[in-house]
Amino acid sequence: MELNSEWRKVAATIYKKPVDSKVFGAAEIDVTDLEDYIAQKRKSGLKITLTHIFVLIISRGLKNEVPELNTYVRRGKIIARDQVDAAVSVLKANTEMSSVIVPNADRHTLRSLADFLQDEIVKSRKGNENESMQSKNILARLPWPFRNWLFALYHTITIKWGISVPGLGLNANSFGSFLITNIGSIGLDSGYPSLLPSSNLSFVMVLGGVKKKPVVVNDEIVIRKMMPLTVVMDHRTADASQGGKMYRYIKHMIKHPEELENLL
């Protein structure tokens, strides 16, 4: 697989992250049967949500279907990541947002992912956050304009030059391969995310609120549960073609969620 095509080299040069390299997309997903599947699993003791389902689908999609999206820009070149790490937004007790990193997320099953996220969310809410979030807290304590200067230095060293800072636990992969957030869980219908300028994320995906809507199925109007799915991609690493491949994989997997119960 050729990552550094002529266009990719040009895109990495003409686009500046994240000012003008963002590509937005949106779709509505029929999650009627998927929500029934989740309800059945919760009755049997497996406490999963739509977030668990989509984290695992996207992670496996990056590993096996669209590895071109599991990349980042370093010194003008597209670099393939060594593994798929998922960043999952979580709501802390004080209504502040944080995130949990799931290393090698594609290697999980639904059960192991549910157990891992539960443990990490508890740690996050107790203040035991990952290194990247701890660095954010340190940055927030600095007075302006020192805060701006330190961020500019960090951004140049880790994001632009791709140099790791082991003492702070910062490198070009500190924030994972992608970020997923479920704003439907906090009452919002849909939203368009931003590409974090402090990260090398290829894309950020947002799960919206599930609503019952009339849709046409087999030429008949029926009531189905629909969920908005929105995404922002870094155009330096991704095109609509990769987004389309991932979307087709997502549609396939939500019809076969039982495949997520087993290791690949």
Image: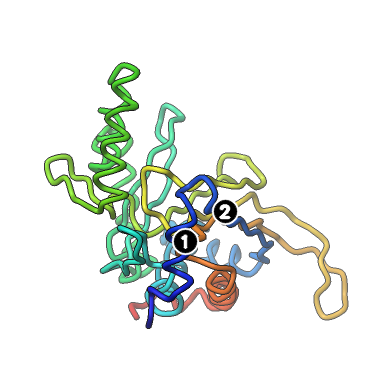
Residue 61 shown left or right of residue 136 in the figure: right
- Residue type pointed to by label 2: Leu
Nearer the observer: mark 2 or 1; the answer is 1
152 or 201, nearer to the observer: 152
Q: Quadrant of the C terminus?
A: bottom left
Q: Residue furthest top?
A: 143
Residue 30 shown left or right of residue 231 in the figure: right
Which of the two discs, 2 and 1, labels the residue nearer the N terminus?
2
184 or 141, nearer to the observer: 141
Residue underneath mark 1: 236
The picture quadrant where one finds residue 249 is bottom right
The residue drawn where x is 38% and y is 67% is 70
The picture quadrant where one finds residue 153 is top left
Where residue 157 sits in the image (x, y, percent)?
24, 45
Q: On screen, 252 above or below 234?
A: below
Residue underneath mark 2: 207
164 or 222, nearer to the observer: 164
